Image: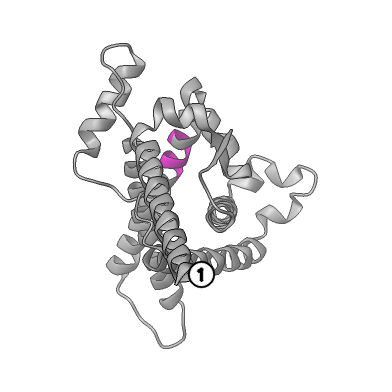
Amino acid sequence: MKIKRHNILVRFIHWTVAISIFILLFTGFGQMPIYKRYFIDQLPGLGWSSNFLITLNIHYVAAIVLIFISAYYITYLLYSKRYDILPRRGDIKESVQIFASMAGLAPEPENDKYLAEQRLAFAVTAVSILALIITGILKVYKNMPGVYLSTSSVFWLAQIHNLFTVILLLSIIVHLLAFIIKDNRPLVASMFTGKIDQDYVIRRHGKWWQKMAARSQDKSKENDADRSADETMTDV
């Protein structure tokens, strides 16, 4: 039996963010002369990659998409009140326990819908994207006619933008490497199908399963109460 883990909207947001970030990273590095220097622009279909204006315009379009989808996701979280991906108190300690369990040094804690390490990784990614959006907007602003920023401001703006680019890239690498661990692999398919095996949920996401079971019982009680009320009205 399969359990729904991600609805289609969450999957759409996830893949839109992933694709836009990939394009931003590729075109961002394209602003440096490395693609021509290392003959990447000689590869089939990548002749445009060393053209500054082309990569810059594509970078801007991908940035607009990322800004829009980020704002949309924040709105979705606030509207749906599904905050289970946000970090919680004790996540660092719980993450250490999860890593210790992988080495056989401790039992794995009962997990909610998302592991503690996933919630922390989300926070790092979200902060990095926010920093990149802010610094990116300021980098565009400084190029507008009549706008002047001091040399030191431009320098530190670029450094902060580059720093969070590296942090984001490293967080993506760690995120992908996590799926080397056998226990994490079933989560990959769920980002495509939205569903995951019930047995996996019961075994590894006990807290989430208990919450779903409790909601199911509450809904069943409500239905029983509504049915009883309907029968009473019919008798009258």
In the picture provided, is 121 more to the left or to the right than 233?
left
Q: Residue at x 50, y 20 (%)?
A: 182
Q: Position of residue 211 (x, y in %)?
A: 35, 43
What span is colored magenta in the figure?
A: 169-174
Could you say which is closer to the camera, residue 216 or residue 155?
A: 216
Prevailing SS of the magenta stretch:
helix
Q: Residue at x 24, y 46 (%)?
A: 88
Q: How is the image coloured?
A: one colour
Tell me if I can see residue 113 in this picture. no
In the picture provided, is 87 more to the left or to the right than 212?
left
Quarter occupied by the C terminus: bottom left
Instruction: Determine which residue is flagged by label 1.
Output: 68
Q: Position of residue 214 (x, y in %)?
A: 35, 44
Displayed quadrant of residue 169: top left
Secondary structure under badge 1? Answer: helix
Q: Residue at x 58, y 63 (%)?
A: 62
> Residue lying farthest top?
104
Q: Position of residue 110 (x, y in %)?
A: 31, 29
Quarter occupied by the N terminus: top right
Q: Is residue 178 magenta?
A: no
Tell me which amino acid carries mark 1. Answer: Phe
Tell me if I can see residue 59 in this picture. yes
In the picture provided, is 120 more to the left or to the right than 10?
left
Q: Is residue 79 above or below residue 141?
A: above
Q: Is residue 188 above or below residue 181?
A: below
Q: Is residue 183 above or below residue 138?
A: above
Could you say which is closer to the camera, residue 47 or residue 90?
A: 90
